[in-house]
Image: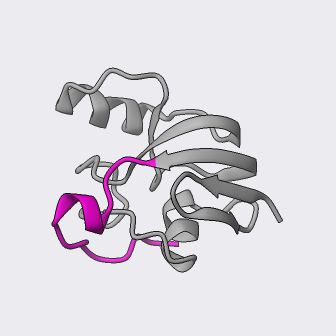
Amino acid sequence: MPKITVLGYGTIEVEKGRKLVLGLIDNGVNILHQCGGKAKCTTCRVEILGGDFSEISPTERNAFVKKGIFDDNLRLSCQVLVKGDLEIIPIMTLENSGMESGPRPDE
């Protein structure tokens, strides 16, 4: 199973092919997510420091453009499929945003 090193949280294991947001949530990382994994709110952003993950989709790229976010290292964890080991920084969490999460993203 791929290992995800989450800066500030440690290392977790996430099933290959699983959405990163679900792997984070299920392993106690309080990543913010408000749109239910639909790539609309961009609150589940993570900075990818390295590793093996799916390519950015047009839907994800459009979400960033609409929000004026232009950083090649940022990804939406609801759109990233885990392919192998990763090293990430969660950008928005329940703790640092003071916000509540929305519905659980779909599998």
Position of 34 compared to 13: left or right? Answer: left
Position of 37 compared to 26: left or right? Answer: left
Instruction: Note whether 100 is above or below 7 in the view shown.
Output: below
Q: Nearer the viewer, residue 14 or 106?
A: 14
Residue 76, percent from left and from top: 42, 46
* Residue at 57% across, 76% down: 27
Position of 5 compared to 59: left or right? Answer: right
Magenta-colored stretch includes residue 102: yes
Residue 34, percent from left and from top: 24, 64
Tell me the quarter of the image containing the N terminus. bottom right
* Residue at 54% across, 63% down: 9
Q: How is the image coloured?
A: one colour
Question: Which corner quadrant of the image does residue 100 belong to?
Answer: bottom left
Magenta-colored stretch includes residue 95: yes
Question: Which corner quadrant of the image does residue 30 belong to?
Answer: bottom left
The segment highlighted magenta reads 90-107
* Residue at 38% across, 38% down: 59
Q: Nearer the viewer, residue 68 or 3?
A: 3
Count of marks, rendered view: 0
Residue 18, percent from left and from top: 64, 64
